[in-house]
Amino acid sequence: MDFELSLRPYILEVNARLAQLLPLETAEPPQLHQAMRYSALAPGKRIRPVLSLICAGENRRDALDAACAIEMIHCFSLIHDDLPALDNDDLRRGLPTCHVKFGEAIAILAGDALFALAFETVANQKSPFEITVPTIQILTTAVGSLGLVGGETIDILSEGKPVDAATLELIHRRKTASLIAASCEIGALFSKSNSRAKLREYGECIGLAFQIADDVLNETGTADQLGKAAGSDRERQKATYPAVYGIEASRTKALDLAKTASQCVQGLDNESLLQGIARYTVERLN
Ligand code: GRG
C-alpha cells in the first residue's frame, strides 16, 4: 500500500495531462470524443506511462506527453481487445466496455482515433528529433505485426488448441511485454543516464511477468476485484501460463522474472522504485 502511494504523484500527472490532450467531449462528433475520454480516463493502473516517467529520471516532465501517448495506445488495444470479434468482454476497469456503452462502430472508431492521437502527441512533443524519431520507431515496432498486433493474432488463432511453451512465451512477449518494454525504453531516451539497454531488458522481464500474473489473476480472482471478467481465459480455452504450467509454477516463473528485472536496474536512477514496480507486477491483486 505504501508503495502504491509512492506511485500516486506519477499517476496524477498522467491523468491530468491525458485529460488535456484528449479532445473535449463537446468537440464534433461528440459521441466519438465521449467514447475516447470514457475509455482513456477510466481508472486504469497507468503502469506503462508511470514506468516511462520513472525511467526518464530527472527529466520526467519532458517525457510526460510520450508517456500519455503510450497510455492512449494501450487504451486503444483494450477497446479493440474487448470487441465481440476478439474477446467479447462486457467489463473493463470496473465499467461497461466501450462497445457496450457506445456501440461497436463508435468503439472501433474511438480506438482508431486514440491510435492517431498518440502519434500526433509524440510528433508535437517539445523534444529534439533525436528523441522524437526513436520514440516513434520504438512505439511502431512495439504495436505492429511483430509486437502487440502479432501477439494478439497468435493468441486468437491459438484459442482452443494445445500450445507449446515457446508459442505461449511468444504470445505473451508480443501482446503484453512489447509495450511495457517500449514504455521503459522510451522513458530512458529522455533520461540523462546511459541506461537504455538495461531499462529495455528490465521492461521485457516485468512485461512477461505482468502477463503471467494477469493469467493467474484471471484464474484466481473475481470480476469485482479485477474490474474485468474473471475465469474467461479458461472458458475461451486461451493459451495461458496456468493452463500450461499450473498456478504455482506460473507464480514461480513470474517471481523469477521480477528478480531478474530487479537485478537489471541495480545502480540505476530510481532503483528502488523500479524494483518496487517489479515486485508489484507479480504481487498485485488486480
Ligand atoms: C494496434 C495497439 C494495437 C492493438 C490491436 C487488440 C490488440 C491488437 C491487442 C491486444 C493486446 C492486449 C489487450 C493485451 C493484454 C495486455 C494486458 C495485460 C492488459 C491489461 O493491462 P492493465 O492490467 O490494464 O495494465 P489497466 O486497465 O490497469 O490499464
Image: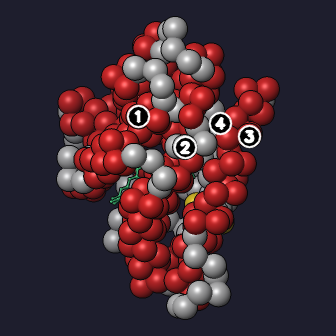
Q: What label sits on residue 285 in the rendered view?
A: 4
Marks 4 and 1: in contact by CB < 8 Å? no
Q: Quadrant of the N terminus?
A: top right
Q: What label sits on residue 62 in the rendered view?
A: 2
Using residue 193 as the reference point, say whether residue 133 is left or right of it.
left
Question: From mark 2 to mark 4, how far is it between C-alphas?
Answer: 31 Å
Q: Give the mark nearest the N terminus, 1 or 3.
A: 3
Q: Position of residue 172 (x, y in %)?
A: 33, 39
Q: Residue at x 42, y 24 (%)?
A: 199
Marks 3 and 1: in contact by CB < 8 Å? no
Is residue 80 at all visible to an observer of this figure? no
Please name the amino acid that badge 1 sits on. Answer: Leu
Q: Which residue is mark 1?
A: 189
Using residue 79 as the reference point, say whether residue 172 is left or right of it.
left
Q: Position of residue 173 (x, y in %)?
A: 31, 36
Q: Which residue is mark 3?
A: 9
**Local SS, label 4:** loop
**Local SS, label 3:** helix
Sort mark 1 into few (<14), some (14-19) or many (20+) by Cα contacts within 10 Å.
many
Q: Residue at x 50, y 9 (%)?
A: 266
Image position of 258 with respect to 47: above or below: above
How is the model colour-coded?
secondary structure
Please name the amino acid that badge 4 sits on. Answer: Leu
Q: Give the mark nearest the N terminus, 3 or 4.
A: 3
Q: Position of residue 156 (x, y in %)?
A: 27, 56
Please name the amino acid that badge 2 sits on. Answer: Asp
